[in-house]
Image (cartoon, coloured by chain):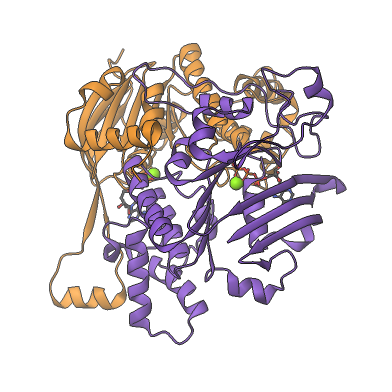
Chain colours: A orange, B purple
Amino acid sequence: MEEYLLKVENLCKSFVVEKSLKKKILSFFNKERPEAVKALDNISFNIKSGEILGILGESGSGKSTLARTLMGIHKPDSGSAYLLGKNIFTANKTEKLDIYKNMQMVFQDPYGSLDPRMNIRQILSEPLKIHNIIPKEGIDNFLNKSLEEVGLSKDSLDKYPSEFSGGQRQRIGICRALILNPKLIIADEAVSALDVSVQAQILDLLVKLKEKRGISIIFISHDVAVVRQISSRIILLYHGKIVEEIDSDRLLSDAKHEYSRKLINAALTLRESGINR
Amino acid sequence: MLKIDNYSLTLKGSNKVSLPVLENISLKVDKGKCLGIAGESGSGKSVLAMSILGLLPKTSIEHISGQIYINDKKITNASEKELNDIRGKEVGFIFQEPMTAMNPLMKLKEQIAEVVYAHKKEINSKDADEAVIKALSRAGFKEPLKFLDSYPHQLSGGMRQRAMIAMALVMNPKLIIADEPTTAIDAELQTEILTELRRQIDNFGLSMLFISHDLGVLRSISDDIAILYCGNLLEKGPANLVLKNPKHPYTADLIAALPRLTLERKLPSPIKGTLPSPNNKPKGCVYSDRCKKAKDICFNTRPPLKEIGNNYFVTCWE
Ligand SMILES: Nc1ncnc2c1ncn2[C@@H]1O[C@H](COP(=O)(O)OP(=O)(O)OP(=O)(O)O)[C@@H](O)[C@H]1O
Ligand SMILES: Nc1ncnc2c1ncn2[C@@H]1O[C@H](COP(=O)(O)OP(=O)(O)OP(=O)(O)O)[C@@H](O)[C@H]1O
Ligand SMILES: [Mg+2]
Ligand SMILES: [Mg+2]
C-alpha cells in the first residue's frame, strides 16, 4: 500500500506568450527568446486517501494549469506525478485508462461542460462505455442510484442539460465524475459560478461523499472562505510557485507568506467588513 | 438615470407554457449611485438585465407590461437602431458568461477595439489602441501589453472576466449593467476592481446596476440593494440596513448561506428545497414553501410591497 494517493514532484509547465506577426519578426531579428509564462514552477505536493486538499491562488497563478496538466490535457515540461505509485506522464495507453478511472475532474462551467445534444443517460454512461463496464443491475438502475447519491431525481435520465438549473448541472458533472468510483476528484472552481445557496448544497455534498466513499478531493478555488471551509490542508500558489502549505484551521491566524496575508486580508475585507469608501 | 416602473415580463416556454419570469418590478438607479441585485440562480436577474437593453429575443417574449426608461427615454418601445446607439456607448454591459460573449477567434485587443470602432468610426488605430489599453488597466489587467495578442482560450478564467469589464468601460458609458462581473476573480483583484468602479461612481457620476449573489461584494459596491426571488422583489432598501438587519426571511437565509471567514470553521447552511419554476409558483408568498417563518396567511395570499422606512420596502406578512 502506497503512503500517498497522489504524489507530485517538481512539476513545471510554461506557455509561450502569443505575439502579433510583426512583433514575432522583430524579436526574431533582435534575437530575443520567445517570451514565456511560467504557469507551473517546480510544484511538489501530495495528498492522502480521504483528504480534501485546497488549492488557493490569485487569478492567473496556475491553478487550472495544474489541474489540466494532471488530467493529461497539457503536457508538462518536466517533473512527475504518481497516482498510487504509477507515473501519470510516462504511463502507456492501458495504464492511463486505469489511472484516469481513479482520477476524475469536475469543471468550472456547468453550462459548457455538458454536451447539449446528449441526454443525461448518454452523458453518464459514456465513461462506462470507454472502460467497458456493464453494471450487473442494469444501466438504468445503476445510473438512477448514482443520481440519487448526488441529490437528483429519478426522472432525470431522459432529460437534456438545458432542462436543468446551474446547480443541478453541476451535480450532473459531479455524478459523471463519480460514475467510475474514482479515488481522487479534481474540482476546478466547481462552485464559483453557482449562487450561494446552491454553492452551500454542493459543498455539503462533496464533504458527504468524502465521508461515505473515502474519496480524496483536490479543491481548487480563488475563494479563501470556501477553500478554508471545505479542505483540511491548503496550498497557496503564486506565479506558478507554492509559497505556503498550511492546515486550514491555522490559515487565518498563522499564514506567514506576504502574498498569503494579502490574499487573506483582501478576502476578510470583502466578506466581513466591506471596502473603504 | 435608469427607471423600471411596474415591469412584468412573460416568456414563452417549451410546449407553449407561459413563464411569468418578472412580476411588477419597480426599481431606479440615480446618477452617481449603484443598485445591487441579489437572488438565487433562476430568480430573474439576468432576464431583467437583458430587458433593460432590449436584448431578449423578440420571439421568446409572450407579454410585457410596465415601462423601462434610460435617461427619460422609453426603452420598452425603442427601435433596434435607437437601442444600438445606446448599447456600448451610453450603457455598458458586462455579460455573465465571458466565454459565450467573447469571439474565440479574435485577439483580446481586437475584441475591445471592435466596440470602439462601432461607435467612433473616424477614430485612428493609435487612439483606439490607447483606449483599449486604458480600459484594460482600469479593469484590473496588470500587464495589459503582454496579453493584447492573446486569444480567449489562452487567458485564465479571471482574465476573461476582466476583458469583459474592459469592453464595458472602453466607451466611458454613463450607466453600466454588470451581471455577475467578478465571480471568477480573487478577492484582492475584486477589491481593486470594485474600488475603481466605486471611484467612477463617486467622482464621475457613473450609475450602475450590479448583479451578484455574493452579498459581501454587493455591500462593498452598492448604495441600495434589491432582493429578487422567483421574479418578485422581496426586499429593497439601503445596503447597510438590508444586510445588517434583513427584514425578509429570504434575505436572512441568503446571508446565512454565504461562506464566512469568522474564526470558527463551519460549512455555510444551504437553503432547504429548490426555487419553484416560474410557471409553478406557490399561491401565496413566492417564498412560503421554503420559509421557516411561514404562517397560514403566507400560504394563501400574496403579501403586498410595504414601505417600512425611507426608501425601504419589504414584501412579507411579518
Ligand atoms: N492554453 C494556454 N496558452 C497560453 N497561455 C496559457 C494557456 N493556459 C493558461 N495560460 C497562461 O498561464 C497562466 C496561468 O493560467 P491558469 O489558467 O492556470 O490560471 P488560474 O490560476 O486558473 O487563474 P483563474 O483563477 O483566473 O482561472 C496565465 O498567465 C495564462 O494566461
Ligand atoms: N430565453 C428564455 N426563454 C424561456 N425562459 C427563459 C429564458 N431565459 C431565461 N428563462 C427563464 O427565466 C427564469 C430567470 O432566469 P435568469 O437567467 O434571469 O436567472 P438568474 O437570476 O440570472 O440566474 P443565475 O444566477 O443562474 O444567472 C428562469 O426560470 C429561466 O429558466
Ligand atoms: Mg482557472
Ligand atoms: Mg443570470
Q: Quadrant of the N terminus of chain B?
A: bottom right
- Of all residues, the one furthest to the bottom in this rendering is B122
Q: Is residue B156 visible?
A: no
Question: In percent of the image, x 23 and y 45: which residue is there?
Answer: A239
Count numbered badges in the picture.
Answer: 0
Q: Position of residue A198 (x, y in %)?
A: 57, 30
Q: Position of residue B203 (x, y in %)?
A: 38, 60
Instruction: Tell me: residue B208, above or below residue B228.
Output: below
Q: Of A111 and A123, which appears nearest the observer?
A: A111
Q: Is residue B37 left or right of residue B296?
A: left
Q: Quadrant of the C terminus of chain B?
A: top right
Q: Position of residue B113 (x, y in %)?
A: 43, 73
Instruction: Tell me: residue B109, above or below residue B293.
Output: below
Q: Of A34 and B7, which appears nearest the observer?
A: B7
Instruction: Tell me: residue B285, above or below residue A11.
Output: above
Question: In percent of the image, x 42 and y 84: which residue is there?
Answer: B123
- Of all residues, the one furthest to the front in this rendering is B310
Instruction: Tell me: residue A21, above or below residue A175.
Output: below
Q: Is residue A100 visible?
A: yes
Q: Of B253 and B94, which appears nearest the observer?
A: B253
Q: Position of residue A217 (x, y in %)?
A: 41, 25
The answer to which image quadrant residue A216 occupies is top left
- Of all residues, the one furthest to the left in this rendering is A31
The answer to which image quadrant residue B315 occupies is top right
Question: In percent of the image, x 58 and y 40: which residue is there?
Answer: B237
Q: Is residue B42 left or right of residue A240?
A: right
